[in-house]
Amino acid sequence: MLNENIKAVRKSKGLSQEELAVKVNVVRQTISKWEQGLSVPDSDMLLSISEALETPVSTLLGETVMESKVDDLKAIAEKLEIINLQLAQRNSTRRKTFHWLLVLLCAIIVIISAVLISLNSPYLGWNYSNPETAVVGVAFHAFEWLFVRLAPIILIGGIIGIILTRKKV
């Protein structure tokens, strides 16, 4: 029973025989003999093994230790892998959405620019004696003035964003 418990606890802690041997200052073959039941550690060595494995001596001597911790670790690792895949998928979806929003923004800027160029600032020839026409003309001029100054910056930023969010091969 002691031999099985030493082996089970060692494996559950993820230690090799060599690593345990280094911790308790013996050779690997000694650990192997203990685990095969060919020899038994003395009381001082049993305390050292207990400390190295961070397990009570009573567990090593009497309680049956199951290797369920290894299975638990595998289950946790599988769950973490699933979570990582879900996070990667969510990040990919966000990246694609952001990419297409930037493409749409650039397209809108190009379309508005084309419309403004084709209209050729018609408000310049309007009669501003009518207050409503003056308000609309000033608003149109303010929009055009602001758009001409901000659109290149936004367009360059959008193009850089499109390049940075494209799918990497």
Image (tube, rainbow, N blue to C red):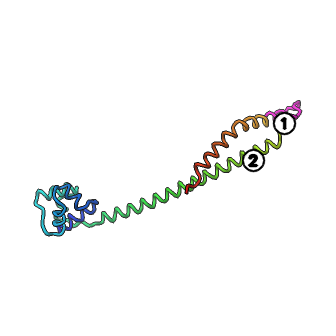
Q: Earlier in the sequence, mark 2 or mark 1?
A: 2
Image quadrant for the N terminus?
bottom left
Q: Is residue 82 left or right of residue 72?
A: right
Q: Is residue 102 left or right of residue 115?
A: left
Disc number at residue 123? 1
Could you say whether the residue bearing mark 1 is in a helix, strand or loop? Answer: helix
Residue 146 position, x and y percent, is: 72, 35
Vertical order, 103 against 11 (above or below): above
Residue closest to the far top: 129
Residue 128 position, x and y percent, is: 87, 31
Which amino acid type is marked by label 2?
Answer: Ile
Query: In the rendered image, which residue does mark 2 sit on?
Result: 111
The picture quadrant where one finds residue 8 is bottom left
Q: Is residue 139 visible?
A: yes
Residue extent of the magenta highlight? 121-138
Residue 99 position, x and y percent, is: 61, 51
Vertical order, 153 against 92 (above or below): above
The picture quadrant where one finds residue 13 is bottom left
> How far, Cα to Cα, is label 2 from label 1?
19 Å
Query: Which of the two residues, 117 or 72, is positioned nearer the viewer here?
Result: 117
> How many callouts does the rendering have?
2
Could you say whether the residue bearing mark 2 is in a helix, strand or loop? Answer: helix
Q: Is residue 2 visible?
A: no
